[in-house]
Image: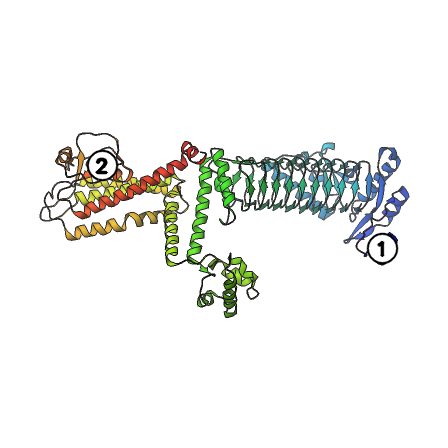
Amino acid sequence: MCLCVLCFFPPSAGAVQTQPERVSLTVELLQERLRTPILREGSSTVDLRQMVIDLRPENAGFRDAFYQLLRKELQKTGVKPLGLDLSYSLIQGDFAGSELGLRTPLYAQAIAPIFTASEQEQLERLRYICLESLAIALPNSKDCRSLLGTQSTPATEIAVFRGALTLVQTRFNGEVQFPNTFFLQSIDAQDAIFLKLTNWNESRFSRAVSFNGASFRQVSKFDNSVFFDKAYFKQTQFQEAADFSGSIFVNNANFTQANFKQLAQFGGVQWQGNADFSSVRFSNQAQFTKASFEQLFFLTEATFEQAIIFREAEFNQPVNLRGASILNQADFSDARFSQEAFLNVPGLTFNSNQAKILGNPGQIGKMLCVPTLQGNQSVLRNLGQNFRQQQQIADANQLEYTKQRLRLTELSHRLLATNINSASFKSLINLGFSPIQAEAIASRRQLKPFRNSSELLTLADIDLEMYTQLSDRLVASEPLDFGGWLLQAWNWLALSVLLLLSGYGTNFWLVFGVGGLAIAYFGWLFWLIDRYRRWRPVPIVPTYYETISILISFSFLTFLSLLAIFRNTEQPLLTLGCLLIIIVPLPMALLLRLYQQGRYHNLIDVSYFTEDGTLRQLRLLIGRLPVIPRNLLFRERYMHLLWDRRWNWLNYYDFSLNNLVKLGFNDIRLRDEHLPSIISALAWYQWSLGVLYITLVLWTLSRTIPGLNLLIYLK
């Protein structure tokens, strides 16, 4: 029956791929292949493909002949180097690959007569990289130190493999030994299988290296190696520990889709090119301690089942963690980030109840970045909860600030962008769509409203180029009526003010600077109104001493406040502009009106301000109003400020402090008799701002003091 099926439905030519039968390598066959090398990519290569090479101890005679014959041909100097191709072969026993290299001392005087000019140039590159390593305090290998010497010893010699090495789908049943070897040509080990330990430590790879799809079943050692050209480890399987510690990747390194089953050691590695670990799976701990990343570091959609450690690592460019999964712990303690570096974490899978992200308090939160709020709210929430559980309140607040800034951007876009669900035909034309495209949009939204602007690409008349040009000016949401638009605008305004004046309740020193500037400004304003009244007929003006004192104190308080603002906000000019819009226009308009109409009333030569003469102490005046009551008993308690005292100018700052912060040394208020309404309006205006300001202060303190945060967030 099976035979009938095969007769009627024969398998296609590509359906069954049979592995070519391997041939046992003998001394005679080896000699023949050495005499007749093949031409591979322009280079002569010893063809040992599809062989069974028995290098076990019980076959010692063949093993010794194998190394002797190969070494003789591969180590010939002064001629074009000969490559070695072991693709699809089976290597039984240990493979001492370094024995096939030319043993040579490393110091420069001995290199010259042995190698060709191009090979000498490559060895000089090795010398340069080693000198650079020593310069940054990474003397991680003995061959680097020996390059600086002048005498040759056995310990200062390396094996130089001059030709290309091809190991495509080669299977090594024993150990593979290439320690302290310098490869002048490329290595191609795609889909190779290493069943036992592989030792490449302190090796140097001058050309591109490819271990794509290779399988390391036992420990693989690449520690203290240098990869001068591109290194490919795509889809490589590391079943046991992989050690790359102390290595240098001069060019790009690609570990995409690699799988590390056991410990992965990358401590002290210098990544001078891009490091791509996209879709890599770390089943065990990954150590990048003291690693240096000079270019981009990609961890896109990588999975970390156990701890990943970046202690004292250095990042000079962004780290892409988009879509990565942290299931245990990510430790960025004492890591250093340049001005261009940050951790890009959109779509990060992270559960704060099971995993942790560690870092220096007050710093790691600033390094976490997401481009949009949509799709990343849970990411920001989990990261914030992670830092709250670790009592890193500053980092949790930084994430909250980031979240609200993204929300402000989203509100701005919704208010200003064109809503494709409600835009008129003419608006779509003015935006840049053709009449045919606008008609297609109108027809589509009648059937079903757009959920997001990217659905425009489902229309046949709109291509990707058009969408890319207009995407920043489009929004897809429920149509808003005028009342809804005003509500959105109010939310935008309130959020903008909170972000500019307090970092959304996350920066107490910013709030302190804002309050200090307002107190200084209103203190100077009330002093000016009270002490500078008129020139004629009888001048009522302050003394020179008082004028100089108020100007110096105002300048000093303003300087300290501006310093606090500029040091604690990303947009100090916008913060300053927002504050000035609140405290300057209305008071200045009232001030101009006051001096324009003049002052003609009783008690013109008595201060408008009174103080409680019964007590002189620091008071919390939450329920205090700026004007004294009309009751005669209160008038007896409150006495007018004395103008003839040299310290009188301090009282105006005290009144401003009372109005804004509800705290002062004396209970200073406005009198209730013969008081110009403009002055009363100014006092009530500052008092109203004070209610809002003290609310902002208390809210900010509740978000920045750890004890209060525990009560709020962990209840």
Q: Position of residue 501 (x, y in %)?
A: 36, 44
Q: Main secondary structure of the magenta part?
A: loop
Left or right position of 570 against 131: left
Q: Residues within 10 Å of mark 2 (few under 14, many from 20)?
A: some
Q: Nearer the viewer, residue 226 or 471?
A: 471
Which quadrant of the figure has residue 708? Answer: top left
Q: Nearer the viewer, residue 616 or 143?
A: 616
Q: Position of residue 590 (x, y in %)?
A: 21, 50
The earlier-in-sequence mark between 1 and 2 is: 1
Q: Nearer the viewer, residue 421 or 466?
A: 421
* Magenta residues, start to end: 14-21
**Would residue 222 be visible to someone looking at this image?**
yes
Q: What residue sits right under mark 2 in the picture?
A: 650
Left or right position of 691 against 373: left
Q: What residue sits right under mark 1 in the picture?
A: 5
Could you tell me the amino acid type at mark 2?
Answer: Leu
Q: Position of residue 20 (x, y in %)?
A: 84, 49
Q: Quadrant of the C terminus?
A: top left
Q: Position of residue 226 (x, y in %)?
A: 66, 41
Helix, strand or loop at label 1? It is helix
Q: Nearer the viewer, residue 398 or 16?
A: 16
Q: Is residue 461 above or below residue 615?
A: below
Separation (CA) of disc 1 from disc 2: 106 Å
**Would residue 207 be visible to someone looking at this image?**
no
Could you tell me the amino acid type at mark 1?
Answer: Val
The dot on residue 181 is none
Query: Magenta stretch containing residue 535, yes or no?
Result: no
